[in-house]
Image (cartoon, coloured by chain):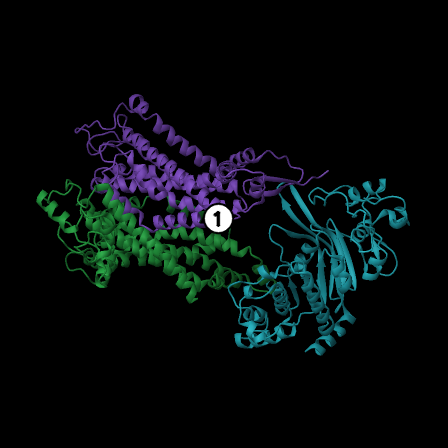
């Protein structure tokens, strides 16, 4: 006999196809995600880059037999060959090794930045939406201010003020990047806030912390995951641009961005030097964007909010 | 409508306050002073440093410094109230009076430096924006109308690529193709730097040649983003009940799409464009640097490399103010476009 | 205009039916099969008649209307059957001709007037648009006609109102405006899909009164689709009761409501709470859930919920049998002479 089952999960209740088995929100999402080919491929690409970044020293040791900074002025601008699998640059350094270490830098900074931005942004968003009133107004003014200040100018200003190390970059970028996240989380929080389950939980005497951490936060997680994925791509682009401008990670530490700093000049010597780092960035960011979109489709196929 | 605008104006003021506060704080606390030991700038001697510190009154209480910098100090002075702020005997004009500071290096005022460069930045960004719109709207509408078919899929791929490509890299590739390679292949090629040619430049054709590549980059980036947005706006508009009513009235599909649906999608687009208004001044920095385009972004970059802190700070504040005004303008436009909002 | 229209319609009714639906089947393909939203229905409508189509959500009543207008959202489509409007089969018309009929000869109004009007254009313009589309009137003339029509449907100060936006109207007025929009071209057929469901009860009565008046004054044939029996009883000459995409009972309003011959109709009537019932009498409901249209039960679609189901009902699909006059119902029990009221003496029907 046909039964109508309503599933309750983040995003509210929806009727499940009658007679179809139902697993529970996260398992159901995983199944949807598995079925999403683009999502799976993007995830695979990202994981691949992350893996390479992690085992960079191993690759350097076993595969290319070069370090990222070893120069060889006799062998500059080499084309891809047995010795230099992807060629060498203007100082004879092995491109592949540098790319692999570049992944480390770019992805490392990227993830760290997103982590920090998420922490700040989600906290602000949740608190603002939960308490409402003055707290909300104040926090949102703060968000407005941060969003109003032109990001890249601010980064440049901070870069010349602090002379930051690679560890400090994530903080600099995150100091601006958290704001859009806070906005998103707050909007979601406001919707959740007005749902009956919040009122119900309050009426049984749950305190503020519990309500925020145990109820608002878990329900915001899908949104946060999507936003994080998209933000990762943007952060990688920002970081690369700063490196290119010479205001980010300084040579000789390779990042995809600073490998392109002088690309223009060396173009006539070797096309690879211009193309490869750019493609690396391009692929990574496409992967994060497509992954974000796929996740959005998985968690909210009804696109209830625009 | 007037009340709507007035209310928006009021909410802008705290934001302006916040922007100036942030930049002021950054400058002041991080470096401890306007000229952090002058280690960055080889042209300043310790004597210069002391002199500048005195001039800027950096040993006064923070509140006073801030108030002065913003121009409240000067405003109070003009009504004889300057004693309100502690230790304030060296009142200078501030932001409110139009004094955004001077360069540490050559003493040029921030405003005059901006004045030289701002038109160039606007030339680039406005052209890019218009071009971007010109591409995005038809692409978005087409994608929505033929949703799911190959034309939609193809355009989607282009958009996704546009999102993911690093701006500076895109510029490099274009230069390498249209300037370097074309030149090498004997084809007519495009200049890769500046807004006009150094020799014999300035004519309309010359300016267009220089403008083409950088504007194309900016347009491409806008177009990727906006076409997706228009697509989803159109899809949403097309799924609304009033579209069903329109069809029930016997309307041809073309009219349904372009007169009924698009008008609604445009409303949302205006908000988006509005969000970009602030970026008209600040969003072109990277492109300017790669193409050596003499705009505000390139100016900031050059000054930053020279550790001209006060100049960079002045520019940041100026751009920040423009951003807030830009947001305000965007809100007003939105009020015009969507009649429902005027009464909120 | 009213007199001329009525005369013309009366002439026509002598020669052909206004609308004749034959064996309409409309389906929506889904992942694992198809949903049979309308599963072989046939009915007719004469000029100037009022017909009510009653059923719960999922019964296929709205889909029927959308099928007639050919406004189905893909992937839904008409699988088979004919829809003859003034002798022409609408299912076979090219789209451009169908566009000519929509709004000009058949008009439709929908449930939610707030979302059914375009929020960014003024009401006057929207109401006049059908005239611009079908009669090639230009804006000014169409606007004047629209104002007249707005006045006719009972909107006070129509000239002023025409210059306003939909969100400035109240719910009832919006629906009046929608009705005006539908009538500007004087169509012979008006389809109203749940026109009062989204409105307050007091406004509902007003709108129904308006529809009644329009039918009397202009002779516009009206199909009124609703789940609310009360609405139908006051307004319609004939009734169709739909369940799971089929017609289970049809007849004049009197016949069907006074003497229901299908357990579903009977249960619907029973479940209307009565003011004079005992205080502790249970509210009567219809047991079970609406059917899964992609996976219908065997035999009679209603049998899982029917208090009178017999073995035959599980096996065989009942056909419409006549009960005199226009009254027909598809039920094995009543076809065999059974009667629901006597069958329940001493037994609760839930």
Q: Is residue C328 visible?
A: yes
Residue sitting nearer the eye, A245 or A86? A245
Q: Residue at x 64, y 63 (%)?
A: C109
Describe the element under mark 1 as helix, strand or loop.
Answer: helix
Is residue B130 depicted above or below A12 in this figure? below
Q: Which chain is green?
A: B
The residue tagged 1 is B150
Query: Residue at 53% across / 76% down in the picture?
Result: C140
Residue C288 or A133: which is nearer the viewer? A133
Query: Where's the N terminus of chain C, which quadrant?
Result: bottom right
What x and y, as percent, mark residue C313? Answer: 83, 43
Q: Chain C is which colour?
A: cyan
- Residue C81 is left or right of residue B41, and the answer is right
> Would you say B297 lies left or right of A203 here?
left
Q: Residues within 10 Å of mark 1 (few under 14, many from 20)?
A: few
Q: Position of residue B161 (x, y in %)?
A: 39, 45
Estimate the x, y position of residue A137 in percent, counting from the top left: 42, 50
Chain assigned purple? A
């Amino acid at each position: 006999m046909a039964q109508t089952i309503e599933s309750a999960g983040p995003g509210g209740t929806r009727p499940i196809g009658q007679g179809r088995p139902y697993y529970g929100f996260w398992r159901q999402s995983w199944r949807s995600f598995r079925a999403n080919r683009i999502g799976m491929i993007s995830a695979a690409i990202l994981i691949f880059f992350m893996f390479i970044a992690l085992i960079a020293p191993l690759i350097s040791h076993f595969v290319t037999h070069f370090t990222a900074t070893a120069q060889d002025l006799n062998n500059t601008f080499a084309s891809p060959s047995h010795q230099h699998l992807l060629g060498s640059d203007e100082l004879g350094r092995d491109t592949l090794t540098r790319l692999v270490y570049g992944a480390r830098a770019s992805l490392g900074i990227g993830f760290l930045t997103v982590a920090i931005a998420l922490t700040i942004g989600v906290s602000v968003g949740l608190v603002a939406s939960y308490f409402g009133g003055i707290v909300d107004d104040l926090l949102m003014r703060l968000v407005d201010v941060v969003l109003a200040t032109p990001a890249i100018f601010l980064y440049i200003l901070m870069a010349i003020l602090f002379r930051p190390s690679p560890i400090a970059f994530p903080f600099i970028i995150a100091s601006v990047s958290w704001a859009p996240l806070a906005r998103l989380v707050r909007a979601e929080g406001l919707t959740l806030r007005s749902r009956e389950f919040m009122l119900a939980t309050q009426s049984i005497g749950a305190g503020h912390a519990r309500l925020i951490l145990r109820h608002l936060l878990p329900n915001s997680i899908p949104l946060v995951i999507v936003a994080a994925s998209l933000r990762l791509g943007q952060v990688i682009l920002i970081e690369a641009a700063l490196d290119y401008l010479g205001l980010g990670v300084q040579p000789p530490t390779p990042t995809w961005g600073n490998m392109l700093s002088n690309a223009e000049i060396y173009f006539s010597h070797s096309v690879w030097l211009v193309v490869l780092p750019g493609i690396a960035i391009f692929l990574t960011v496409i992967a994060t964007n497509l992954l974000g979109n796929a996740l959005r489709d998985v968690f909210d196929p009804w696109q209830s909010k625009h | 409508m007037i009340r709507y605008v007035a209310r928006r104006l009021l909410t802008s003021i705290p934001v302006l306050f916040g922007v100036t506060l942030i930049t002021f704080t950054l400058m002041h606390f991080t470096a401890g002073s306007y000229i952090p030991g002058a280690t960055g700038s080889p042209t300043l001697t310790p004597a210069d440093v002391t002199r500048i510190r005195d001039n800027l009154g950096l040993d006064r209480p923070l509140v006073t410094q801030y108030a002065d910098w913003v121009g409240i100090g000067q405003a109070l002075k003009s009504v004889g109230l300057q004693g309100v702020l502690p230790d304030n005997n060296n009142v200078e004009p501030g932001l409110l009076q139009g004094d955004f500071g001077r360069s540490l290096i050559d003493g040029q005022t921030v405003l005059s430096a901006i004045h030289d460069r701002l038109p160039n930045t606007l030339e680039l960004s406005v052209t890019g924006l218009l071009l971007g719109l010109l591409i995005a709207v038809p692409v978005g509408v087409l994608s929505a109308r033929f949703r799911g078919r190959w034309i939609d899929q193809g355009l989607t791929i282009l958009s996704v690529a546009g999102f993911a490509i690093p701006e500076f890299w895109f510029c490099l590739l274009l230069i390498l193709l249209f300037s370097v390679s074309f030149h090498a292949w004997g084809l007519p090629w495009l200049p890769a730097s500046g807004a006009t040619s150094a020799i014999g430049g300035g004519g309309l054709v010359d300016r267009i040649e220089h403008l083409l590549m950088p504007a194309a980059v900016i347009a491409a980036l806008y177009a990727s983003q906006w076409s997706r947005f228009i697509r989803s706006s159109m899809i949403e508009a097309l799924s609304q009940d009033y579209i069903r009513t329109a069809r029930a009235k016997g309307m041809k599909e073309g009219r349904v799409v372009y007169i009924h649906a698009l008008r609604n999608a445009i409303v949302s687009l205006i908000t988006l464009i509005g969000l970009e208004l602030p970026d008209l001044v600040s969003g072109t920095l990277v492109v300017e640097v790669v193409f050596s385009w003499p705009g505000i972004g390139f100016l900031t970059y050059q000054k930053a490399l020279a550790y001209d802190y006060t100049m960079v700070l002045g520019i940041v504040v100026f751009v920040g103010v423009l951003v807030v005004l830009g947001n305000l303008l965007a809100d007003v436009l939105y009020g015009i476009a969507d009649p429902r909002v005027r009464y909120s | 205009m009213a007199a001329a229209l009525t005369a013309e319609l009366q002439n026509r009714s002598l020669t052909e039916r206004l609308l004749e639906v034959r064996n309409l089947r409309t389906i929506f393909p889904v992942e694992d099969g198809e949903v049979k939203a309308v599963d072989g229905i046939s009915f007719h409508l004469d000029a100037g008649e009022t017909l009510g189509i009653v059923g719960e959500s999922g019964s296929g009543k709205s889909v029927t209307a959308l099928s007639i207008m050919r406004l189905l959202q893909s992937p839904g489509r008409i699988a088979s059957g004919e829809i003859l409007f003034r002798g022409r089969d609408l299912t076979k018309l090219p789209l451009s001709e169908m566009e000519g009929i929509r709004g000009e000869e058949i008009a439709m109004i929908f449930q939610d007037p707030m979302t059914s009007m375009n929020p960014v254009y003024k009401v006057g313009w929207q109401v006049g648009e059908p005239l611009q589309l079908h009669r090639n009137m230009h804006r000014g003339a169409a606007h004047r006609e629209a104002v007249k029509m707005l006045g006719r449907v009972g909107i006070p100060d129509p000239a002023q109102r025409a210059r306003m936006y939909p969100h400035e109207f109240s719910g009832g007025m919006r629906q009046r405006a929608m009705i005006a929009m539908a009538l500007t071209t004087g169509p012979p057929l008006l389809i109203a899909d749940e026109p009062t469901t989204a409105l307050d009860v007091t406004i509902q009565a007003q709108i129904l009164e308006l529809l009644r008046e329009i039918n009397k004054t202009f002779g516009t044939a009206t199909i009124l689709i609703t789940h609310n029996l009360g609405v139908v009883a006051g307004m319609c000459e004939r009734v169709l009761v739909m369940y799971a995409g089929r017609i289970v009972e049809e007849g004049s309003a009197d016949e069907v409501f006074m003497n229901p011959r299908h357990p579903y109709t009977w249960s619907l009537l029973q479940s209307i709470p009565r003011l004079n019932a005992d205080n502790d009498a249970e509210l009567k409901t219809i047991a079970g859930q609406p059917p899964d249209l992609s996976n219908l039960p065997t035999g009679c679609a209603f049998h899982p919920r029917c208090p009178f189901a017999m073995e035959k009902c599980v096996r065989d699909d009942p056909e419409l049998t006549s009960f005199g006059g226009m009254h027909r119902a598809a039920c094995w029990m009543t076809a065999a002479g059974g009667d629901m009221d006597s069958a329940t003496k001493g037994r609760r029907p839930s």
